[in-house]
Amino acid sequence: MKRTIVKGMIINGVAIFIAQYLYLFVLLLAIVFFLLQPWTIKKSMAICGAIIAPIAFLISRISSYFYYDPRPFVVGHFVPLIAHAADNGFPSDHVLLTGAVAMIIWFYDKKWSVALWILALLIGWARIYVGVHHAADIAGSIAMVIAASLIYGSIFRHRNAIKGTG
């Protein structure tokens, strides 16, 4: 019985840490990756980020006006493991941010990107576990980031085709 309680407390503690703070580690990794790149890649990454992140954010704000998803603790009438406002849970800003970072890096290094996507998904799991998001909130954030990257990819593929480089 005591082992079960202790195990539950450890899992809860780890989930709380991941839900609240792991996004900072993702940002740190992205900064390290960025700093390790030559100037031309840094310039390209900055442009990529300046396009993908705002598009994903804009999509998220617009979609949140059309889809309202009460947070799990509101619907289920329980206290979440982390304090949170009882506002619209759709989409998950944490997953939107970390997914955008992972997607920006996708265009430059697939291995780093996959590692960052794993961390973004782990953050999504933790946000569900602690009771502040539904799976639809996480999936919606991922879809928005992918949509933003497809928009970016189509713009730059088209631009390269016009220049004769694509």
Image (tube, helix red, strand yellow):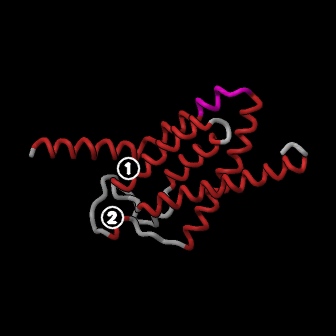
Instruction: Name the residue located 34 percent from the left edge and 58 percent from the top edge.
Output: 131
Q: Residue at x 51, y 55 (%)?
A: 93
Determine whether, in the image, residue 115 is placed left or right of residue 83.
right
Q: Quadrant of the C terminus?
A: top right
Q: Magenta residues?
A: 31-38
Q: Position of residue 122 (x, y in %)?
A: 42, 46
Residue at 15% from the left image edge and 45% from the top image edge? 4
Is 128 included in the stretch rendered in magenta?
no
Question: Could you tell me residue 18's position as x and y percent?
Answer: 39, 43
Element type at mark 1? helix
Name the residue located 55 percent from the left edge and 67 percent from the top edge. Answer: 64
Q: Is residue 79 left or right of residue 146?
A: left
Which sits in the foreground, 116 or 21? 116
Disc sitting over residue 73 in the figure: 2
Residue carrying label 1? 126
Residue located farthest toward the right when viewing the structure as drawn? 163
* Amino acid type of the residue tagged 2 in the rendering: Phe
Sequence-wise first label, 2 or 1: 2
